[in-house]
Amino acid sequence: MNTPMVIRIGICGLGTVGQGVWKHLSRIRPELEARLGVKLELTRASVRDRRKKRSVTIPAGKLTTDSLAVATDPNIDIVCELIGGTTVARDVTLGALACGKVVVSANKALICKHGAEIFETARRHGGHFLFEASVAGGIPLIKALREGLVANRFPLIYGILNGTCNYILTQMEEQDAPYSAILGEAKQLGYAEADESLDVLGWDTAHKASVLTFLAHGTWVKPEQMIVEGIDRITPGDFKNASALGYGIKLLAVITRDFTTGELSVRVHPTLLPESHVVAKVSGVFNAVSVQGDVAGTTLYIGRGAGQDATASAVISDLVDAVSLLKNDRRAFITARKRPGPARPALACRLAPPEHIRGRYYLRLTVSDEPGVLAKIATALAAQHVSIASVIQSAQEPAGAASLVLTTHQSDERAIGTTLRRLSRLSCVLEKPLLLRIGDFSE
Amino acid sequence: MNTPMVIRIGICGLGTVGQGVWKHLSRIRPELEARLGVKLELTRASVRDRRKKRSVTIPAGKLTTDSLAVATDPNIDIVCELIGGTTVARDVTLGALACGKVVVSANKALICKHGAEIFETARRHGGHFLFEASVAGGIPLIKALREGLVANRFPLIYGILNGTCNYILTQMEEQDAPYSAILGEAKQLGYAEADESLDVLGWDTAHKASVLTFLAHGTWVKPEQMIVEGIDRITPGDFKNASALGYGIKLLAVITRDFTTGELSVRVHPTLLPESHVVAKVSGVFNAVSVQGDVAGTTLYIGRGAGQDATASAVISDLVDAVSLLKNDRRAFITARKRPGPARPALACRLAPPEHIRGRYYLRLTVSDEPGVLAKIATALAAQHVSIASVIQSAQEPAGAASLVLTTHQSDERAIGTTLRRLSRLSCVLEKPLLLRIGDFSE
């Protein structure tokens, strides 16, 4: 009988997620070992402060403050990078990959910013980079896209990727309460960070959309190349207007690819979704991702997108895959190991220009309450061939102001962008207009 | 430069699914070959009738009527068993596994009936058995349970696993039309088989529940050990009653495991689901599976459960996994290959007795329209300590009959079963009572 292979795991960063991984891995280790036929050893963990109180008990001899030492320790096979941020985390990731190790990461910001470099380093040195936990937490979405749907191309992927925003939107609608009040509540409950901007302005969703775009289309699109709009200007009145029109409001990432022209578009924006649509029913901190495959049709994935346990579940799934990779590598006895890079070869693919991104729009304007205003606004829309589908008008604070809500027929991002700039310059338009997209997704 | 490894694929059975696999695999082969670093060869296919017209063009030299010859052909590495049934399909599967090949299967009835034998044969001869297409079609659910949620135990899995039944139920509710009329429509549209019984009586769902139970709990539960009830006795009136109570009706498989006692229950029955519940919104031929994991929390998967393309998508996903297995096996240069058997080691686990399966119930009785009937019925329920929560009574054809709908508070399968038998014996009860379960699943 052979002695089982020992797989040694290092964890960099023992925050909420790191502690969750340690906790669950310690608990289920015997079962995993039996199934995988290896010994799993939690070898070392790096922390910022050795003396900080933690929810898990870790022998002092296993703790270090030197993350890079864990990453490059020749006694460690798998490195979990759970530090966050894009500086030390980058050094740790590249350092471990350069040693040919497997890196497991939950860090979407890092992948979005340095993904090309990370995958190239892995390829060059025979390392592996696994990142199930970076998008949609406990939902095995990365695995579904990479493996389960391998026969498919993806004309459309869209979904709710940020639980904080979905919680805020859900509560605003249910409580008929303003954004600022619900944001305060969310911070108290720990559903929003002290600095909420990364979440509510859409950047966290954009990071995740970037990761999904790479997986689905083999190309990197940076947040600054996307349309990214947040939820901070939405009011309870918008929910009432949307409801009157038969819609709910969700912050969505939308990734479309036209396989005839090769054009790709990636965007993040609050979206009106038909109330009957399953994604419109996904409330609270849950994530939901709809994946249209050209063979499998549409599949939809719903679950917790964040939190200690859901994220640990995804990290441990990657750890198990890492063990299989290591077992096969060791069997292969090869020194200059070569790995395939991205999941998808980068087909000819370019970003769609704004005039090719078509859709219907919801436009809320605060206007002076006087005759002739609607005519001026309608004229501005007509100049860009934006055709009005419906109008809701209501008086509003302050006195003398009215709220004007328009929906449009099909138009495009260039026309609506130009229209918005022209409307902003009209003296009868008192505030920057609010634009929401209407999501015409079939299920 | 090395010549790429050639992987030779045989397809047994060129019906709807087999043709779909051939079609899509032919189309995406170059992309898959580039990604996997192998040559894929569609080597042979077996058919019942060589001259039958097919939607795909296959060189005559590749066709044979001898499925077993394909299964055991030493030139074939991967065998797709797409014949269906449990006789020839069993011979093909066991024959190929005994040669140490990889078998890819969509055959839930076969797995349910002969799963233990199949996995044991694979283990003994170093073969592999992959079956993503057997449950929930285009949704990569098997992979999610086996790999993505590997850190989890599963106290509760439930869902819609049969598209035919979900189509019929959806149409009955939407059109307010009787079962028989909608079944006729479904047959014309090709959504139901000429012999519908396997689907509508719940057996197909039970086969799939058996596969999911094995995956989640490492043990085989046969349909005859489950509560299995179909949808054929549901009426448009049941949808109205359910709606008045705030519910929709779905045929669900429900798999529960109590990790304290080890008790497992597997059942298939039409279920009242709260209208606000996401699964209640899943309509038409779609499947939906909710998986409660003890680490990841609840994740939900929705998509097409059947059809040529969705099933082909799942088969091709397994083919890609099969290629990885073969590459690793060949690297390993081992002759007596040993594979781990089930995904989960079989923990101590026994079927829950009926009195431990608790729930609330909906009971529709056709009774004689005369005084004292409700008292007799209430007495029969009270004798089993089944407590009534609500009563809806309405006159009904034929004259002199009334429809009585009761919902109960928490009870259990033993008590409700005894109650039903006693009610059936009452002279005032004119038909066999209809029992529906109320699904109290939190989301």
Image (cartoon, coloured by chain):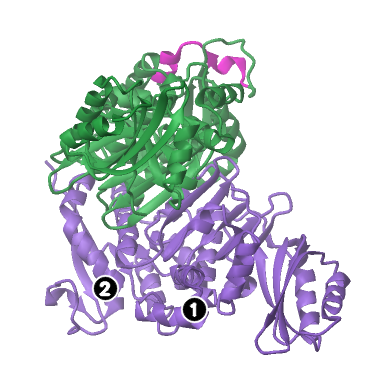
Chain colours: A green, B purple
Tag 2: Cα neighbours inside 10 Å, few (<14), some, or many (≥20)? many
Q: Residue at x 56, y 64 (%)?
A: B252
- The correct choice, above or below, for B143 with respect to B267 in the image is above
Residue position for label 2: B70
Tell me residue A240's x, y (percent): 48, 39
Tell me residue B207's x, y (percent): 51, 70
Q: Is residue A209 left or right of residue A123?
A: right
Q: Is residue A417 visible?
A: yes
Bounds of the magenta segment: A58-72
> What kind of element bears circle 1?
helix
Badge count: 2
Tell me residue A175's x, y (percent): 59, 35
- Amino acid on which the number 1 mark rests in the picture: Leu
- The correct choice, above or below, for B3 with respect to B123 in the image is above
CA gap between label 2 and label 1 equals 29 Å
- Amino acid on which the number 2 mark rests in the picture: Val
Same-subunit check for callouts 2 and 1: yes
Q: Is residue B250 magenta?
A: no
**Disc 2 or 1, which lies upstream in sequence?**
2
Q: Is residue A70 magenta?
A: yes
Q: Is residue B253 left or right of residue A137?
A: right
Which is nearer the eye, B121 or A240?
A240
Which is nearer the eye, B254 or B116?
B254
Q: Residue at x 46, y 71 (%)?
A: B171
Residue position for label 1: B198
Q: What's the magenta bit mostly, secondary-structure-wise?
A: helix
